[in-house]
Amino acid sequence: MSEVMHHQALPGQAARAPRPHDAERALAEMQDLQQAVEAIEDEALRGRARALLADADARRLIESVFGNSPFLTRIIRIHPDWLPRLLDVPPEEALADIIERVRTAREAATQADLMRELRLAKSEAALLIAMADMTAAWSLERVTAALTEFADAAVQASVDWLLKDAARRGQIERAPEEVGPEGSGLAILGMGKYGSRELNYSSDIDIVVFYEPGELPLKSGLDDGQFFVRLTQALVKILQERTEHGYVFRVDLRLRPDPGGTPVAVSLPAAEHYYESRGQNWERAAFIKARAVAGDAEAGARFLKMLTPYIWRKNLDFAAIDDIHSMKRQIHAVGGHGTIAVNGHNVKLGRGGIREIEFFVQTQQLIAGGRDHDLRGQQTCEMLDELARKKWIAPEAADELKRAYRFLRTLEHRLQMIADEQTHTLPSSDEGLDHVACFMGFEDRAAFTEVLVQHLRCVQGHYAKLFETAPPLAEESGSLVFTGTEDDPETLETLRNLGFSAVSEIAATIRGWHTGRFAATRSPRSRELLTALMPALLRALSRTSNPDTAFMRFDQFLTKLPAGVQLFSMIYSNPSLLDLLADICGTAPRLANYLAQNSAVLEAVVDPNFFKMLPDRETLRASLASALAHARDYQDVLDFTRVWAREHRFRLGVRVLTGSADAEEAGAAYAAIAGELVRALAPVAEDKIAERAGRVPGGSFAIVAMGKLGSEEMSATSDLDLIMIYDLDDPNAMSDGERPIFASQYYARVCQQLISALTAPTSEGKLYEVDLRLRPSGSSGPVATHVQSFIDYHQAEAWTWEHMALTRARILSGTDELKLRVGSVIRETLQRQRDVAKTAFDVSDMRARIERELPSDNPWELKYVRGGLIDIEFICQYLQLVHAHAHPEILHTHTRTALTRIAAAGLLPPATADLLVSAIELTLNLTQVIRICVEGVFKPEEATPGLKALLARAGNAPDFSALEAQLRESQASVLEAFEQIVAAAAKA
């Protein structure tokens, strides 16, 4: 780039800007912009803006923005007054002005002021940098450096403000003006593209936060860990939270040591111990790009200097390449990344993409950087040149890879500029590709495709040559000898390097497997297969957050297996099953216990369609009918239903564990399984009674699901709330069998038989616990209720809480006529006009009674804690009862759907509805995971890091501490909503 270009204002380089893809939109937006300019209040600024619009070059550049990027168009539409200061001066000068304003934002009076200033500056910087990119005024390296400079300034300003604010609030015992980042002990490192100053246009920023204990004089009772964790959480909020002005950066904290088991800020001594004892090769690769970006620069520099021997080893480190291979194979295992394509191709992770170039460089840096300091650089293109200079690669390879890298990174930026999305995937439609081709400056899609494919194939070719000797997945570097009676020292070292702690005990256990003392390893063939699987098995277990616990549970699983050859053969043919097994053993002992007795169910997981969709009711019904087709008697029916249910619930548990089914899907699927079992067993129960009592002429019965079964929000351990309602022509009728009984007795016995069929333990276990207490008159009423008694009771005797329960009533089985009649009764009951204050009082009173009987301030008591599940359900049920008369459309058994309908009817402010929907999603997502992994209430202090990480993922939180904070915040908001909606109405 010439000095002239470097110091020229952007309109002077507008000829290089791509033409507008949507010319009509560009024209319309220009007309709107002219009107907006006339509305600028500052006369001088208005004059400068008019002059810009009169300049042909400036118009060309603005039209290019309008015709290609809806995101940038929105910024100009909202802030037309920014254009003069961005386009009247060279872009370097404009960027310097923006960054200076970011730096002064640290003096903001409030956090809200700081957040507003940063977000406005980010929008302005995004517009400026995009235009400098589009006009080729800046090279790729200058564009990524500008994005990084802005990020540094934003993070530094936020940290400075937070430290001074802590002093103002008395948390640091110094005057605010005496508090700053230097000497604070706070070291914030930028990682990945942020660390290497190669941020992409809509990138998140990867940071790790460390602190040196004892550097800040904190107030009495406040320890360093608490202080820096809260400061980190506040920093994430300042940068990441979306407001009316947008956001600054998404923040990713997952590159810290053991993110599943550590707080968001880690002490420097703990971090040093981790990297010395547990650091992994992929973390070494990550720290190649680490850079101190904010906080105490000296502390950051000291820590990175300490890590130097860990990152850069003096001996040629070919062992580290195994992990690079593994990471790359995992990326390519994701759908759509396996072949070179254009439509829908991922230019970052796909074949021939950006990640392959980065791996190409980093791999050789890890091998040679220990001895050659010149190969320790952070930027990709610079290191390609250095690798060529040191003759690790041919100069032609360096040039080709640099050209491909700059093209693909520019393409990545243009994709992200369109809508400010962190995307790396090309559009799948030809129309979308036409837009991208135009935005990249090509005449048409064909020309763009030709150049793109050429670069992708070039990258793939160089990468394939580098990795053509990649070892197979099952190969393990290091000795793994489990023969004889004594420990092999090299094997123990290998196990330690894999991340295990109790290595001697593990080695002894594995030797025990090979003795054939268990059924699973009794045959020579099973032992041969297990030996072949051992390296991959240990590696899979080592990837869990607590390898020792996962190994112990795998041992328990293995010793319970009735045979091993079939399972080991299946795993040998499908290595991905090892990771699933490791996850189950590491976090879900309940599933592991079932799997040990039913290993054949893993065959279902191998099916490529397993993770795509859950079976619908028709599929479940056909599957259950097929399972029962061979039942010879009543006992067979009980056993076969239990086998069928266990398998389907295990499959569903795996879906929850792997995150491929959320609470919305899992709750409905568990309810569908239960519903089909009830439908299948109800006629079997009647047949059993009819063997001696016969049948009641003209009689029929219906089963009504209540509670979680009714609302289709079940989990792995939910019981079944049921009501049986019967009808007959003659109220005094008797059954017609050899031992006739009155109709009331008959249906009571059918109901009891159905409960027995669902709850009785057989050799195959039991199905469910069943609760009938929601029937009319509760435990004191008959177990089966005549339909007229049901009607009379709900018209005259039922308590408000019983009508609340009725909002979740769903009819599972019965004759069409009876189902219509019962459904009509339920609707009429719920649509009755009610006294709002009395209903609110009854709901509040019921909630208070529950709180007296089951008090809890434990946020993990998800159901009973204030602000928990009961409060959300009671709000929903109260609103349904008092408004269904005028708005019958709000009646739905499913809580989330009901809340959405209540909001749509204007009965709940959208913000409150969103809050409640988010709260129930969070609560139920956590409940699903806890129910498959834990017996009883979840106790964080007893939980493995893996389970905490799993819960954080289920709650869409960056880590467990953030999840707990999110959960408490959600419960506080729900409780506030309950007080405003229900409790306030009760006092009216």
Image: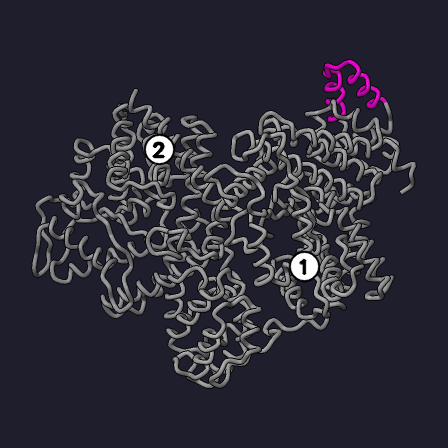
What residue sits 83% from the left and 26% below the top?
Answer: 88
Provide the residue span drawn in magenta. Answer: 28-54
Q: Position of residue 466 (x, y in %)?
A: 75, 67
Predominant SS along the magenta part: helix
Amino acid on which the number 1 mark rests in the picture:
Ala
Magenta-drawn stretch contains 231: no
- Up-down relation of residue 958 to residue 796 (above or below): below
Q: Do the CB atoms of the residues marked 1 and 2 lie less than 8 Å apart?
A: no
> In this image, 771 relative to 655: left or right?
left
What residue sits 68% from the left and 57% below the top?
Answer: 350
Q: Residue 949, can we see it? A: yes
Residue located beneath label 1 in the image: 285
- Up-down relation of residue 229 to residue 381 (above or below): above
Question: Tag 2's secondary structure?
Answer: helix
Question: Tag 1's secondary structure?
Answer: helix
Give whichever of 139, 302 is nearer the camera. Answer: 302
Give whichever of 910, 205 is nearer the camera. Answer: 205
Please identify the quarter of the rendering in which residue 338 is found: bottom right
Amino acid on which the number 2 mark rests in the picture:
Ile
Magenta-drawn stretch contains 39: yes
Q: Within 10 angstroms of label 1, few (less than 14), some, or many (20 or more) residues?
A: many
Give whichever of 350, 617 is nearer the camera. Answer: 350
Residue located beneath label 2 in the image: 875
